Amino acid sequence: MDVFGTVSAAIALALKLESMAEGLAADLNDAKHFGSTLEKARLQAQLETDRMRDMRVLLFDVSDEKNVIPGVTFLNFDGRTQLALLNLLRHFSDLLALNYKIVDERYGAAEPSVSMILNTSISFESFQQASWAKRLRWGFRDKKKFEKILQELQSWNDRLFSRIQISLVRMAVRGDIHADVSSSSAIVATGHTFLDNSPEAGRLGLDNDTKMLQLASGGESGFLAQLRDDGLKDMISRRGSNMGKGSWTTADIDRQMVLLEYKEFLPDLQNNPAVASERRVEQLANMLHSKKSERYHMLSCRGFYVEQQQFVLVFDIPENNRNHSISTLYQDFEQRRKPSLGDRFNMAKTLAASISQLFAVGWVHKSFRSGNILYFTDPVKKQEPQWLNPYILGLEYARPATETSSRRVERHEIEDNIYRHPEQWGMPTTSFSILHDVYALGVVLLEIGLWKQARTISKSGFSRVMSGFPVKDKLESWASDLKLGSAMGRRYQEIVLKCLQGDFGEFRGTPKEQEVEFLERFNTEVVNVLDDIVQTL
């Protein structure tokens, strides 16, 4: 199939899926058996329908510019990505058609076959104008079936978005347009400007993702808002007495709870931070300050100030959590409370997806551990922590392309080192890589599966270990143990081992192409597999 045939097929599938989603939302208007949850269900269905439509328009809509072909954005992708998107759309369409009866009121079954969709002799206009698309409806029978459909719709929307996000933001920031299509000036021009002018990109959050990648790629040379505000220190009226694991505490500003995160720096002779260090923190604060989708699971940074050889970042607390208590996942392992098996799988998926979001916009965490994963709890209602809505804290402020680490003091605390790849123990001499973050994720996933702190795996708490390699071997041994497999299943066990071992295969091409291929494999082999497990619960 030539590239334009691929576009035609992809457009047809996207329109088909959008019609199915619209049918689901429309049927809810007459669904009497949903009771008090009808409005919420209708809203969720409409949100997912709108999201699917925005992605379809972004990828395939016809441009008003002369000589620009339909599907121009899609054509900017390399052939491998185009086929991956086509297969994703086709798989989702076939899955829904197989599992959920889609009927036409007058004519019965009315969906085109895959062979018809892939027939390049049929133009995509015929699919756009086909009357069947407006007459499909969903054949669901009960609330449980609807919820399953909606869960799958959200899941596949997430997967489609992850696929296009990686390429689109790089296309907009770096001009990563594939050589096979770069000869078309209209395509190249559109590839550089479409995210800035697209309302669909704005609703999907891709414009903000682009800004975050700009900060990661070129933030040091400009684009930074001045977020240092030493006046914030004088506005603080109360500080929490119990600072979390040496890095954060709560406080009040204008009678509203905020979170303060502390980051050490090595002072100069005047006791001030080095210019380069402050620039890095400014860069990090800008990233954390920028508007972000909830999929990142990060608090918004108001600004920062300097105090006692530390940068202090000030984070706003979401309004509905301002009177809640805060605990870390590390602390929760010590409590008797234990989330359900389903909640633990959801926790794992959410954390893996959040890390994937950082990777997608060119950032790494560099200090990912259970002590930097926060949960809010309503003390009045005495509920369990909000297991499915974590907030990730503790990003280091040096990028791997410019520094090995922002740590200025060599530390040997096993509570921190156990999450670090052996190459990053102490004062690291090798540059930080994405795989080092993936290793830390593997340690946290092991903790969630066993529901215990990683350091307690060893009877001695690894207190006498001075090298990371024996620790890594011990963690891999526990990940291979029957106890984890019996608790969480074989697929979860394989994910933990994959993360600890960095086993994602070999990559070819340029460094940029290898980066994109790794992100796609990570989503496919880690995030999507965890999502598949959740879908089967």
Image (cartoon, rainbow, N blue to C red):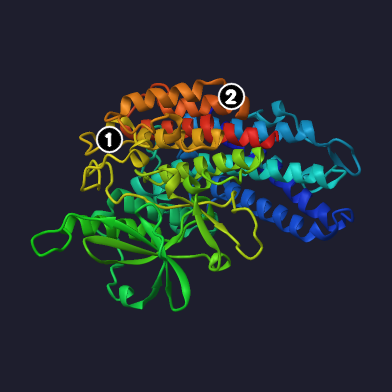
- In the image, 120: left or right of 526? right
Q: Residue at x 32, y 25 (%)?
A: 469
Give the spatial CA distance, label 2 vs label 1.
29 Å
* Count of marks overlaid on the render: 2
Rendered image: mark on residue 425: 1
Q: Residue at x 78, y 49 (%)?
A: 23
Residue 289's place in the image compared with 85, above or below, is below
User: At label 2, which amino acid type do we have?
Assistant: Gly
Residue 390's place in the image compared with 249, above or below, is above
Q: Position of residue 94 (x, y in %)?
A: 72, 31
* SS at mark 1 in the image: loop
Q: Position of residue 144 (x, y in %)?
A: 81, 44
- In the image, 117: left or right of 106? left
Rendered-image quadrant of the C terminus: top right
- From this viewpoint, which residue is outermost toward the left? 269
Q: Position of residue 275 (x, y in %)?
A: 16, 59
Front residue (pair 112, 334):
334
Rendered-image quadrant of the N terminus: top right
Front residue (pair 305, 238):
238
Report if residue 64 is visible in the image.
no
Report if residue 120 is visible in the image.
yes
- Residue tagged 2: 485
User: At label 1, which amino acid type do we have?
Assistant: Trp
- In the image, 348: left or right of 425? right
Front residue (pair 64, 235):
235
- From this viewpoint, which residue is outermost toward the front? 460
Q: Residue at x 35, y 35 (%)?
A: 436
Badge 2 or badge 1: first in the primary sequence: 1
* SS at mark 2 in the image: helix
